[in-house]
Amino acid sequence: MSDAYGFYTDTTVCIGCKACQVACHQWNELPAELEQQPSEHGPGQTRPMTGNSYDNTGSFSDVNWRHVKFIEKSDIPAVGTTPASVSHSPQDPNRDNLQWLMMSDVCKHCVNAPCLEVCPTGAIIRTEFDSVYIQEPVCNGCRNCVGACPFGVIHMGGSGNAGQGTAKKCTLCYDRMQHGLTPACAQACPTESIQFGKIIDLKVRAEQRVKDLHDLGFPQAQLYGADTKILGGLNSFYLLMDQPEVYGLPSNPKLPSRAVIPSTLFSMGSALLVALGALFAFRKKRMDEFATDPAAKER
Amino acid sequence: MKTEVFFLPAAAVPEGAGSFTNTQRLLQKHEKAVDPPDDARTDLWFTYKLGVRLKELYQNSSVPHDGGIKALTWSYIDPEENKPWRIKDEPSSELVMREINGYTVADKKVVKGFGDLKDDGTTACGVWIYSGIYAPTTDHPDGFNRAAARTPGQIISPNWGFAWPANRHILYNRASADPAGNPWSERKKLVYWDANAPATDPQGKPTKGKWVGIEGEVPDFIVTKAPTTPANPKGVGLDYHSGADPFIMKADGKGWLFAPQGLTDGPLPTHYEPYESPVENMLYTKAGRNPVAKLYDNVPGNAYSPPGNPDYPIILSTYRLTEHHLSGSMSRWLPWLAELQPELFVEISPELAHEKGIGNTQLVNIKTPRATIQAKALVTKRIRPFVIGGKTIHQVGMPWHWGYKGIAHGAVVNDLSALVGDPNVNIHEAKVFVCQIEKA
């Protein structure tokens, strides 16, 4: 295999412009998610706003392979959840701890990819660039990968698989990469928050950036997925300014195969317990019969 | 004079070729991407047709003062350029740019720059500041449109677009060198005096020493005027300046901290509250609001709220969103952009939302002395109330760009704003004004 390629996303310089989402839609010819698509009869109609900061697409979907998250993090509780505890003093110093975090989320192209592991048809493959790619004509729509992905990346959609839809996600612009082009999102990113390149080079750059941020007085700066701890490493790794959970990322996701031995043992153990329970139950029944039926004693 | 207003079906920017100029004076060409639909045409097309009709109207006139229109050069059609398109009578912006650059009347050859222009009628030029944009080169003896040049550089990029005047990318760049002509900092070297460089003075005589720019940056200074040149107190124009006066467009050649003349206000900057404010002006209590602001009190529906008016106690600040372009008239029709900001909203602090009983995404009425509109609430801790003089004063924020048509549509925030102009150039002051909000 040649070198591994992927993304290093520096969330500190993300400005939330969503140019990556639009570029992804455009290159991959993905439609917007509207209440009513434009037609000759009308201009179309958007879905209602979510009210969750400036995020109006909400999550990944079959047509949203990129998703820019807007996280308004502060020490005071969210409005509406506990109205009584809302601070009414604008001078509350906790207000100053407000952070508006932005992060362009995408498929992580995991080195040990759970989706690839559970795919029964071999539709999900590892490319020569070490990216994880869904061959849609081979997908039988079983949805195993949807549940296996710890990041909620994969969704079903499209007209493949005899109209039943196939698994959809970021291709790392496999078609562009085969022609030596940068993925559309990274090319569109105006602040170089999304950087594309050889993983080995990106890691050097990311580690230097973390060091610089630490030196500037941001000890919370950390890399996510740059080492092998998370699923053998993520070929789309992140520089975060808080714990992964703040960004909605799992701090310790597991491969489905890791659950095979413990769950086998657990199943065996529970089977044993059921068997023992049954034995004891029958034994108790016989004992009870002895206790209540004098005739049984005589037998 | 009686006037009549015509609505013309305007083409959008990508539907015609042309150039745009940004605030650093850089002209960049944009190509035509697609024909405009139906009867829509470019501004250039309408202007060209108007000229053609005027010339037709006056062609048989024998009145001397109509001679100007009769003699007007007005041929801008290049059939070759229009070949790929449906619209065959679109004027060529290239030919217009060539004329703006200037040429010698006798042989129609493009001039190198405004230095070649003469006031004896032998040369013609559309506007001197753009002269040189179509200058000839060895490769293009008939000139080429530098607005279309796309060679990136390191710092200045002189071969990317054309910066007016004379492709000077940084104005007054002689100020990047100290009075003696040496760079203030080697790291930030831009334009400096090279005492040993062979040069030619304005009279055409060979001399030594000239101003040099890195990466081809054009010095904004007389190239052979040495830093040691003394000022001539009786000189006119640039002769009045010494070789150490970089600000050549100023009368004295110096940089100014304040403008002693020409402004309605000034000379020093100061602070006034916006024309509509929930508080009185602390700095000038007697003057109150800006006494020289341009007001439109006689315009119907443009009532102003006085400072501290309890009916409109909330500050309304306005801004733009990255998903929209200008008024949104183009971007709100694009599904990929419309879905990202689907509805007009008003950003409200949790404190104000609590006070008014407004929940996130609930409809809100926003009222000013001009109008009342509706928008959904976006309750966010990013909006923080002020405490001014011990009193809590709330602010809300609203983005521009919605309108009644498009995939994403909503109320027009400009219905709320007040018409107030700044005293010098009439820039719309009312980006911020006062309002009252309530649950709809």
Image: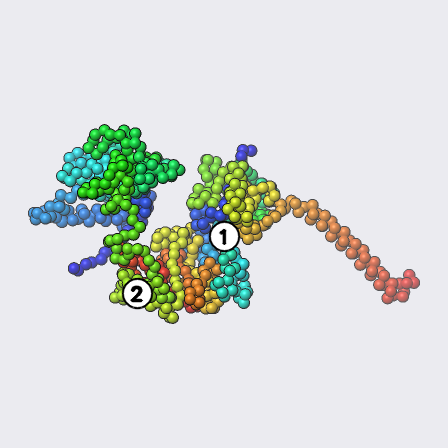
Q: Is residue B386 visible?
A: yes
Q: Which numbered mark, 2 or 1, is in the foreground of this view?
A: 2
The answer for how far apart the CA atoms under marks 2 and 1 are is 43 Å
Image location of residue B120, percent across then percent down: 13, 39
Count of numbered tags: 2
From the viewer's perspective, tell me whether residue A30 is left or right of residue B400. right
Tell me the subunit letter for badge 2. B
Observer able to see residue B152: no
Q: Which residue is mark 1?
A: A101
What is the secondary structure assignment of the residue under circle 1? strand
Nearer to us in this view, B13 or B428 = B428
Quadrant location of the N terminus of chain A in the rendered image: top right
Q: Is residue A147 above or below residue A298?
A: above
Which numbered circle lies on residue A177?
none
The relative height of residue B264 versus residue B199 in the rendered view (above or below) is below
Q: Which residue is rendered at x = 50% and y = 66% of the image?
A: A88
The image position of residue A120, as x and y in percent, is 60, 43
Name which residue type carries label 1.
Leu
Image coordinates of residue A195 in percent, x first then y, are: 48, 42
Look at 21% across and 30% down and name the residue there: B205
Secondary structure of residue under mark 2 = loop
Q: Which residue sits furthest right?
A: A298
The residue that disc 2 covers is: B287
Which of B234/A144 is in front? B234
The amino acid on which the numbered mark 2 sits, given as a three-letter code, is: Ala
The quadrant in which residue B132 appears is top left
Q: Position of residue A231 (x, y in %)?
A: 60, 43
On screen, residue B419 versus residue B378, left or right, reads left
Q: Residues within 10 Å of mark 2 (few under 14, many from 20)?
A: few
Question: Where the C terminus of chain A falls, by quadrant?
Answer: bottom right
Q: Chain of mark 1?
A: A
Please tell me which residue is depicted at 36% across the width and 60% down the height of the picture.
B432
